[in-house]
Amino acid sequence: MIASSYTGIALALLSATSYNVGLIQEKRALGRMPAIDLRRVPHVIASLLADPAWLAGFALMLLGLACQIVVLTFEPVSVVQPVLASGVALVLVLSRLVLRERLGAVEFWCVVAMAVSVILLAASAGGAGGGAGHHANPGWMAAVAIPSVVIGLLVGASPLRRRPRALSAGVCFGIGTGLLYGVAALAIKGLSGVLVGHHGDARIVTGIVSSPYLYVLVGCSAAAMLLYQVALQSCRASIVVPVSNVTGSVYFIITGTWLFHEHLPASPAKLGLRLAAIVVAGFVLVTLSRQAEEPEPGPAPVPGFLADQGRQ
């Protein structure tokens, strides 16, 4: 196994850890804040930026995204995304230890299975035929990304237009933000091509600023982040995060591998390990998302927008 493969998987794990620890920190901060009302976006943004605890979580998430951009420059999507998805296991552990959300037997075994998936990915890395792609056809990229963003916004914002059960709202928020973050991940993958194709700090900065991928990344991430704040405040992290991850991970693996012309390893042994790791990760994420269908004890808080509707 080549050294870059070890480095790539380690950096992807760092990205997943930083990003998901940041999520938990944001969840803790949001629990002490007034209910978020997305009809007042400037006020919401000002409130978030004025909270040091929330800013600490946001900084960790930005560090995770930065690591993700770097690792996607030299590792294929089919390796990076399942490793990033393993952060779900960390969220489940932290949601139990920090947020006091219950970690049942199913979640525990999912944590174990995620660890096995990461080990299989590490064993499958390297070899011919598994290189990272950096360029996608702009027309195909737009044809895939635009409908995905529209669907993500419609599904993610649907709990804001009515008052569904808390679990149903968590699933809708998860699917919507997962699609938006999936498109953002495609933009990150596109930006990785700028890092590869340009040499020198000035040319890299110019290439990033002039790339449409930067603005797709910022727009999708901003919309997903606002929806995610409502979701984290009003729903269990152990529901929203797995559903969002299963949506974003499956979307990114399928579309990213195709759009960027990446291939699975040529070696039959490495191919088997890679496919087994993807299947295990996908099965775990689907299993976790199905836990959202279980009854949630006690009444759950609703977003401020929905609470205001109920008082009218």
Image (spheres, rainbow, N blue to C red):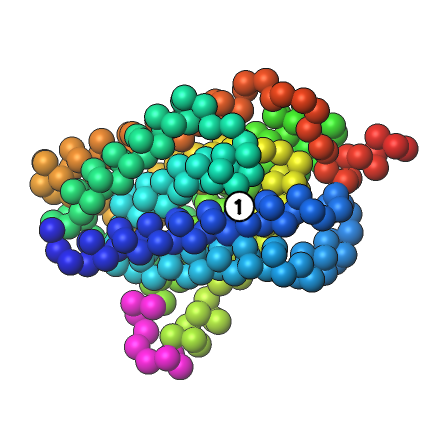
> Which residue is at a point 33% across and 50% down the rendered structure image?
13
State whether residue 21 is above or below residue 45.
above
Q: In the rendered structure, does residue 180 fall within the stretch colored magenta?
A: no
Tag 1: Cα neighbours inside 10 Å, few (<14), some, or many (≥20)? many
For the record, the magenta segment spans 195-203
Residue 169, image x and y in percent? 64, 30
The foreground one among 62 and 216 is 62
> Which residue is at a point 41% across and 21% down the rendered structure image?
105
**Residue type marked 1:** Ile
> Which residue is at a point 55% across and 50% down the rendered structure image?
25
Residue 188, image x and y in percent? 42, 57
Asked whether, in this view, residue 157 is left or right of residue 206, the answer is right
> Which residue is at a point 74% across and 43% down the rendered structure image?
35
Residue that lies at the very extreme toward the right in this rendered image: 312
The foreground one among 274 and 154 is 274
The foreground one among 97 and 194 is 97
Q: Which residue is mark 1?
A: 24
Would you identify the image quadrant in which residue 254 lies?
Answer: top left
Asked whether, in this view, residue 267 is left or right of residue 106, the answer is left
Residue 284, image x and y in percent? 36, 28
State whether residue 43 is above or below residue 311.
below
